Amino acid sequence: MLNNYLSGRMRVSWPRLIGVLPMLADCRQHRPADDALRAAIAAGESIVICQVITGLGGVGKTQVAAGLAHRLWSANELDLLVWISATSRARVVNGYAQAAAAVTGIDLADTEDAARRFLEWLSEPHGRRWLLVLDNLNDPNDLNGLWPPLANAGHTVVTTRRRDAALLDGRQVVNVGPFTPDEARRYLRDKLAPHPERLDAVDELAVDLDFLPLALAQAATYLADQGLTCAEYRRRSAHRRLARLAPQVLPDDYQAPVARTWLLSIDLANGLEPAGVARPTMEIAALLDANSIPITIFTSAAALGHFATRLDRVVDSTDARDAVQLLHRFSLATVDDATATMRVHGLVQRAVREATIAEDRFGGAGAATHALAELLSGSGCDPEDPESWLAYRTLLPHIMAVVGNISSDTLTGCDSPTFRHLLLKVCRFLYASGQYETGRDLAVLLPHRWIGALGPEDEDVLTARNRLGALLTGLGEHESARLIFSSVLKVQRHALGHDHQETLKTANNLGVALGGLGKYREAAELLEDTLTRRRKSARGDSPQTLRTANNLGEMLNCLLAFVQASEILEATHNGRREVLGENHPDTLWTAKNLATSLRGLNDNESAHRLLRDAFDRYQETLGWDHPDTLQTAVDLADSFETLGELYASRRLLESALDKQVEVLGAEHADTKATANRLRRRLPETGAHAG
């Protein structure tokens, strides 16, 4: 030993472990990424390329690498295992120097020289089997000149949140995401196995935490420390910040709470070019739905204006797109180039919202709301035109998320006229597209939210109440709708006069609600008065005038005044075909109503042709699951019965009823009416009740 020391060379023994190998997590779950890494390692026949394990902070990248290292080390398949925390270039160089001394027996004073010597040793034909893990690489530039060589006896594995092209190109990438639902469920059940009484709402907790391994580990530790059930943890989580839900001692040797990990990544991304843009981009994204966020939100005039104000310099769309790519490179978001959208993990969004100061939160929320309004502005975004509905459907989750995320804040600027008008358009879209429950849930929030600042007689407040009433009508809650319309109409007649267009809109809606309650005579009288006033103040072929005429014709049908109804509805049908087009839903609804008049006049063949055409067009325009399509199907089934085609009638009714139960619910008035029709016809068609 003395001779070895004097000669400057220490004794080398094998196998060698350099660095601290992380322990495997308690209740660790075997994951697809484990198999993917194992397959990537085993695939090399002669020269094995580097594997890069990448993903969001907290998904378990280190555990995947540690799983491989433990397996190979315990199976005696390695002569050398080097584990380096690669959070800086200095740490990598020092780790290499330590490894060089261990494998060569020579401890060089210059760490850079020692690091180079270690890289040389890795490429030499010494026959030693080695695994080098560079864990948590923060900056790919830190490995410039330090990448291990390709070798047939060894493997290099890098774990990182980064997804820079220069880092990934030419290397095998192993993407790690959150747990699957089954993995998350198994993990929590394993962790809480000693206390099965704490598993109450375990599945719901996994969903709340979006199946993120580190978040699940910290939640399980916290509730164990506090003696909580999963349900009790969920209640605390709804009212506390993430920082207050972190256990005092973190599980599995984690160094920081999960939220702090993400915020540090945002700091790093924000420091890169375009400097300062990544953070406000993330703050806007944190207010939106986690999935399919259009990149155009960040390149909108509203967002660019917000960035410019925040940074006191011009920020263009190229800067915004580059900022989005920065978030992708740091695994804070995942960009889908094919759809020009990105996804952000829900817990990352929450951490960002909680960490954003009030002034920045106000500005970001204003930018988000105005960007959404900007994307749904213009003549091509009529909420009643089915050709515009794709745009609404795309942005609806983000609009609802913004409303939910700012509802508890005093962000009055987010309820600007621009955003208020957007929300009113969205309510109209939800009504027109038959999404009554979603529309009701949104519309019920708006008057309460606006009335304090705007007053009960404000036009937007009254319009919001009108929208709510219309959606309640769609849900069959006609009495609740009647009360709203009556109250709004009283205010409008006093403030605006009986002939104002907004007053007449409400009068029209009240007539529909009265009809839904079976008060056909009262409804017809109100609608006839409204139609007369509209014809005096607007053209007879205006969409609003035609709407009231249609509704009057419908009420006259209910009163069995088929001659008068057919005259009004035929003129209305012609007017709507000319003004709105053959396939517009309003045109088709009038065709359905006109068919009812014709059947009442015993012109059954004409009625059937009209209904068949309307039904076909409805399916093409709105689809089979729209409430108006289904109601037209029911009327067509009645027409089949009148013509003696009982089998066709029953089959169509059965299909319509199944879909109405799915779309409207079993307790909706339309669903019940269809069920009653079907029960009445079963004996006539030879069917038997079960």
Image (cartoon, rainbow, N blue to C red):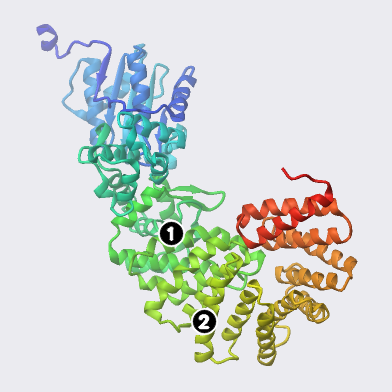
Which of pointers 2 and 1 indicates the residue nearer the eye?
A: 2
Residue at 12 percent of width and 7 percent of height:
1
Q: Is residue 682 above or below residue 34?
A: below
The one of 402 and 177 positioned closer to us in this rendering = 402
In the rendered image, the quadrant that contains the C terminus is top right
Crowd band around label 2 with a 10 angstrom C-alpha radius: few (<14), some (14–19), many (20+): many
Q: Secondary structure at mark 2?
A: helix
Q: Of marks 2 and 1, which one's residue comes earlier in the chain? A: 1
**Label 2 vs label 1: CA separation?**
44 Å
Residue 306 located left or right of residue 580: left
In the picture, residue 612 is in which quadrant?
bottom right
Residue 13 visible, this angle: yes
In the picture, residue 447 is in which quadrant?
bottom left
The one of 518 and 380 positioned closer to us in this rendering = 518
The one of 384 and 318 positioned closer to us in this rendering = 384
Crowd band around label 1 with a 10 angstrom C-alpha radius: few (<14), some (14–19), many (20+): many
Residue 626 visible, this angle: no
Residue 495 located left or right of residue 91: right
Disc 2 to disc 1: CB gap under 8 Å:
no
Q: Secondary structure at mark 1?
A: helix
Q: Which residue is mark 1?
A: 320
Residue at 9 percent of width and 8 percent of height:
2
Q: Is residue 152 above or below residue 648?
A: above
The one of 69 and 230 positioned closer to us in this rendering = 230
Q: Which residue is mark 2?
A: 488
Q: Position of residue 382 (x, y in %)?
A: 62, 71
**Amino acid carrying mark 1 in the image:** Ala
